[in-house]
Image: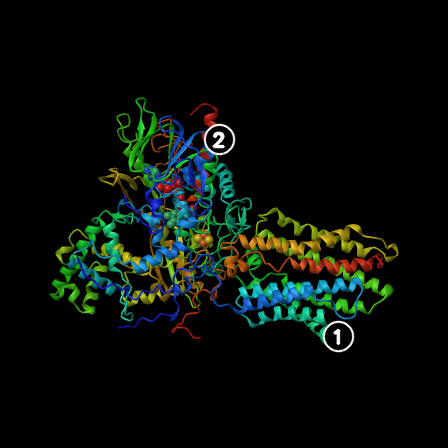
Amino acid sequence: MSDFRTPYPGYDVLAKWASPSWNDQTRQVVRERLLNIPRPRFFNEAEWSVLTALCDRIIPQPERAEPVPIAPFIDAALFEGRGTGTRFAEMPPDGAAWRQGLAALDAEAALRFGGRFAGLTAERQDAIIAAAVAGDVTAPAWEGLPPRRFMRGLVLLEIVAIYYAHPAAQSEIGFGGSTSPRGYVRLDAGRFDPWEAGPGIWPDREP
Amino acid sequence: MVQYRSPCRGSRVRRPDPPHGTAGVRDGAGLGTVLLLAGLGLFAGAVLAEPAPVAPDPSLRNLRRGATILAGSVMADSAMEHFQGSYHNPAMYVGPMAAAGTMLATLRGGDRNRASAARTMQGAATMIGLMGLGFHGYNILKRPGGLSWNNLFYAAPVGAPGALALAGVLGLGERRMAGSRGPERREDGRILGGVVGASLLVTTAEIALLHFRGAFHNPAMFVPVTIPPAAGAALCLAGLRRPEAARRHRLARALLHLTALLGPVGTAFHAFGVSREMGGWANWRQSLLSGPPMPAPASLTGLALPGLAALREIEGGMDE
Amino acid sequence: MTGAVGTVSRDAEEHPRAVEGRAPDVFSRDGFVPMRQWPEEEPVDFAIVGTGCGGGIAAAKLAQAGFSVVAFDAGPFWRPLADFASDEREQDKLYWLDERISGGNDPISLGSHNSGRCVGGTTVHFQMVALRFRPEWFAARSRLGYGVDWPVDWRVMWKYYAEVERACSISGPVRYPWGPPRGRYPYRAHPVNAAGLVLARGAEALGVPWSPMPVATVSAPRGKSPPCAYRGMCKIGCSTNAKQSILITYIPRALAAGAEIRDLAMVARVETGRDGRVCGLHYHRGGQWRYQRARNVIVAGYAIETPRLLLNSASPQHPQGLANSSGTVGRHLMVHSNHAVWGEFDEEIRFYKGPPLLAVCEHWNYADGDPSRDFDGGYAIMSQGPLPIDYASCLVSNTGVFGTELRRRMALYNRMAGLKIVGETLPQPENRVTLAEETDGFGIPKAHVSFSYCENDKRLFRHSLRFMDRMLRAAGGRNLYESEATAHLMGGCRMGHGPDDSVTDSDGRTWDVPNLFVCDGSLMPTGGGVNSSMTIMANSARIADRLVALGKRGEL
Ligand SMILES: Cc1cc2nc3c(=O)[nH]c(=O)nc-3n(C[C@H](O)[C@H](O)[C@H](O)COP(=O)(O)OP(=O)(O)OC[C@H]3O[C@@H](n4cnc5c(N)ncnc54)[C@H](O)[C@@H]3O)c2cc1C
Ligand code: SF4
């Protein structure tokens, strides 16, 4: 199912690592992110297996031998109590919401397909995720946790925040990456600086 | 505790930290950079070069130097500006090339064998410059906002190609003057004075526009919008005097000398401006384009020297 | 309270930097400037809670007038050149990430959407849009028939807009198409990036005016600020120092004038004496609780923390909370609706370049007579430039897309452009801040924020969605989708004409307590259809001048 193709093959924001586009503090942050993958401390084993399966379906990366790690950073943020500034009144606190939500996904898997979430086929996992995103789930384990809010207001947000913080993800969308001290000169449509990604490959566009 | 495979084995951080200060010169150089460097080299050569073999009189020497410097300034400036515009239209190569052409023609075209080729080149530069004015005007008008301050600030510089045309005209003028004598020569001087004087006024308008864009954030930015127009006006007035009343024009001369000085001084200020961009000179690939244009101030010298030549003729070669 | 969030300069998040007679030099990587310090036991003339638009300006202007001033901020004292990375996740450290509870029918997202926590306040990560209110909005009730009137005349505000625009070197267009004439902006407008030109094309196609945006980042050098490098990361902090935040404008001026800034100092309670006047404040700094005596207290913690602090400062003299005898503290909280339309374009727009909002259409703030207009208030339309995580968040929370389809849609990032409104919402008493049962790490009750749109708010944003849809299509956008969000906070301690339905008078002086003042965004009686900071700053500069005048007359 590797039908994702980046429009910018060969472009890598890290190629500018030694250029004026990167300053020391950004190098420090990204080096830390790439080298020090936190070990899980917050979730238990059962939760962890649902979480990793969930991350794999939200951001499938079949083309990568070494997928961008996501679950470890979710775990670390919860373990460190890194907040988001918001808790919706209808939701439990973040950590409790994650725990309950992962358990509810497992319960939903049992209810619909009679198995553990992590053991289901990709299609079935997707069906459960889509149902939760639409608020269309039935397992009693969701009691007190609005599924739509949980998925859209917490799970998806956290996963994209971690994935698109990674240089590999930024490269695949042709983002300019780090920009200090050097920023950009050419601001018009279809124009770019030599230190940006070249023009993308767009199958829907006549050359 | 959960066991899991580190997804980051075989780390992607292949490049070690660079030592301080070496970052910056690593990425490959673009075509524009090459042109830019070539332009600066040629420009330096032009300024230092010996005048052509036949030793011309001081007026001709100044005229030729001025035309050369002006062409060099236009060449480097348009190479950079068009590089910033990514040379997205092949016609954008024409401007810097025409400027280089007329510069060489003026510099080397003194001997008889090459005279007609040089004249053709200078005439072509004049035509291309005039067409460029149309191109730049169209570029401004077609953007959303049309004839607006922001488009005048940031779209193609409205008057710049005029300087190319002028470089061509000055080159042709030198050729013409070399062949004229006596009252005819004096008449040529007056015409030249008018052309240069008017050009100084137009150039001032362009400088004023760009320094206004920079909010005159440094009081020194007012200098090039006060001295050159005064010099231009004084030169025009000098040319209007009847030749019988030949006399010295001390004020005009002093102002033209100051204007000539503004070339190097302005360049130094612009270099300082580039250093004040984020990252300064270490980030030259951005700073040179987004900071004040380094090659631009030289054009004032390029105008002032022909202005001095014109003044000398108007005065009837009085310093001899 | 959250621990250190960032990887870089964790020290600044954990240990106060403005100590021992010096404060960080914000224009250096590791330098300091001298700072005057005031003892805790002796009452200072003004203790100020918060150092954003309100607190920062008040601190600078009052210190310049010769008062002794100590300003507290719960957040760190950053040096942008060394502490800010080009990384969205790292820069979460700029936001107020402590948990707040958000309820109501349309609960709002907090944190990165509207609240900063650092010296300089929310302006350190604001997007620099520097617009003025429409003059009629200061008399919304009597001239336009909705909301309430401000206790301030627009002409006075106009004068102070000019003052703060000068102080922050706003780069703006030579001629601004809407409203009465304003003097020339100190700096010229920036070039409009491709995303802004999308708005321009759409506006020209629909026959409405547009303008380059006036923004608080310089287009030419200014003092130690280099010009904007168009790196587009303004929302996560400007490591160029081109952005004219309060941190690099008013804070250095406040320090130079003798004010003391205490970073990482969370104020928990304002203390009242037996006479009912305030006499000092309790704050937490360097691992311990401390007390600062003060002759006057100015609360400037923004629309959630200001009410929270006042409510948490209840005492026998003020049982409902400080300055709350009318029950108005925390009420009339407003946001800006932030509905948007996004579309794909043939060309690569690359909206990550340049300050994110470089073009604006204020048509619907001024077009009173238009027959399609079915709402009170107004909205401004702005071009967009979210960074990848910001954009991905908008995409997933509004569409719920996931899987390969999510990656595919994110890969269109460089071809997207969007239009977003800053839409006025009406002041409603039930949109409010209260104290929750739960407490935070300091033992202070958490804020509970309740928000619901009223029918007028909904008519307004629906109107805007229809209009932006046409605009984006006219500019060449395809496969459009809509998103909703909110931004900015206003109100919560509004100023007004009388003690029954407002918290302070026009000087920011609370009706109940003569030596307690409010000076920040929470004073705003109505929200208007433009971003809030310039109005908050102008109002704060005005209040500071009033305080100086009152002081001269001995009326403090
Ligand atoms: C992402 C974003 C983009 C924005 N973009 C724009 C824009 O483009 N244009 C515009 O006009 N506006 C914009 N705004 C809004 C604008 O920044 C705010 O309206 C404005 O800064 C509010 O000023 P303030 O002084 O009221 O509060 P703030 O600037 O938030 O200052 C309050 C300060 O008080 C401190 N504080 C609070 N409580 C306490 C306490 N108890 N003890 C100690 N310290 C405390 C906080 O740490 C904070 O630093 C934006 C806001 C955000 C979040
Ligand atoms: S775009 Fe300009 S203001 Fe924004 S972060 Fe970059 S340099 Fe600063």
> Which residue extends farthest front?
B19
Question: Residue placed at 18% from the left, 57% from the top?
Answer: A102
Quadrant in the picture for the N terminus of chain B: bottom left
Give me the chain letter of mark 1: B
* Label 1 residue SS: helix
Q: Point out the image quarter for the C terminus of chain B.
A: bottom right
Instruction: Give the SS element for disc 2.
Output: loop
Indicate which disc residue C144 carries: none
- Vertical comparison of A67 with C39: above or below: below
| Residues flagged by tags 1 and 2 on a common chain | no
- Residue C506 screen position, x and y as percent: 42, 32
Label 2, ligand 1: CB separation under 8 Å: no
Image coords of residue B188 (percent x, y): 81, 64
- Identify residue for label 1: B115
> Image quadrant of residue B156?
bottom right
Toward the right, the furthest residue is B244
Q: Is residue C78 visible?
A: yes
Question: Mark 1 CB in 8 Å range of ligand 2?
Answer: no
| Image x and y of residue C515, in percent | 38, 27
Colour mapping: rainbow
- Report the Cα–Cα distance between label 1 and label 2: 74 Å
Q: Amino acid at mark 2?
A: Ala
Badge 2 is on which residue?
C65
Q: Does residue C441 appear to the left or right of C280 in the view shown?
A: left
Name the residue type under label 1: Ala
Q: How far across and down, in percent of the image, does residue C94 sit? A: 36, 48
Nearer to the camera, C451 or C80: C80
- The crowd level at tag 1 (other Cα within 10 Å; few <14, some 14-19, many 20+) is some
Asked if the residue under mark 2 is in contact with the one under mark 1, i.e. CB atoms within 8 Å, the reply is no
Outermost residue toward the top in this view: C275
Please identify, in this view, whether the residue under mark 1 or under mark 2 is nearer the observer.
1
